[in-house]
Amino acid sequence: MKKILFIILLVSLKVNSQQLVGNWKVVCYEDEICYFNKTTDSILYKDTTRKEEAENFRKMSDLIIFPITYNFDSNGNYTMTNPMIGKTHGKFKIDKVTKKIAFIDDENKKFEIPFEYKDEILFLQMKMENAYMKIGLKKN
């Protein structure tokens, strides 16, 4: 019985890895101030006292957030392309139990990012100094 459960666990982990394989583009962005969905061109202000700051960032997001793409291959390699800073290559590994993706870059630096896969959108949440940033990725 334990062997069967272990095999099911391994298969479910593999399925999650396979779901990631492909090219992904940023379609939405969230932080403590607002949520912006590029696909629907909608914005939700979480902190109305910082509405002007959110609007300014929304205008800049076409240059700094939405051009970013990710590519995950079936061998556990990833490439993040940011037109402003270039490409980052490395390995990735999914931990379904902790719901984190471990990224290991070319310099062997490892960082883990919490993820959620919902409605065909992969959400990655990154901690900033005093805040957070969450991006939603959709397969091309």
Image (cartoon, rainbow, N blue to C red):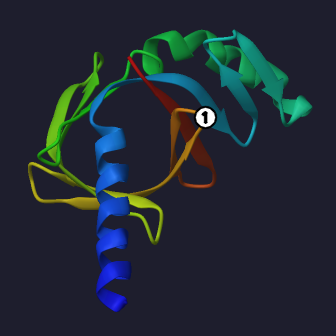
* Type of amino acid under label 1: Asp
Q: Residue at x 19, y 59 (%)?
A: 109
Residue 39 picture quarter: top right
Q: Is residue 63 left or right of residue 85?
A: right
In the depicted view, which residue is nearer to us: 7 or 21? 7
Q: Is residue 94 visible?
A: no
Residue 8 spot, x, y in % from top left: 36, 70
Q: Is residue 28 above or below residue 135?
A: above
Residue beneath label 1, please? 119
Residue 11 spot, x, y in % from top left: 31, 62
Residue 98 spot, x, y in % from top left: 46, 70
Identity of the residue furthest to the right in this view: 48
Residue 79 spot, x, y in % from top left: 20, 33
In the depicted view, which residue is nearer to us: 121 or 88? 121
Q: Is residue 101 above or below residue 7?
A: above
Q: Is residue 75 above or below residue 49?
A: below
Residue 9 picture quarter: bottom left
**Neighbours of disc 1 within 10 Å: few (<14), some (14-19), many (20+):** few
Q: Residue at x 90, y 30 (%)?
A: 48
Q: Residue at x 29, y 74 (%)?
A: 7
Q: Report helix, strand or loop for mark 1.
A: loop
Residue 61 picture quarter: top right
Q: Is residue 87 left or right of residue 42?
A: left
Identity of the residue furthest to the bottom in this view: 2
Q: Which of the image's four quarters has the C terminus?
A: top left
Q: Is residue 104 left or right of residue 32?
A: left
Q: Which of the image's four quarters has the N terminus?
A: bottom left
Q: Is residue 39 visible?
A: yes
Q: Residue at x 53, y 35 (%)?
A: 135
Total labels drawn: 1
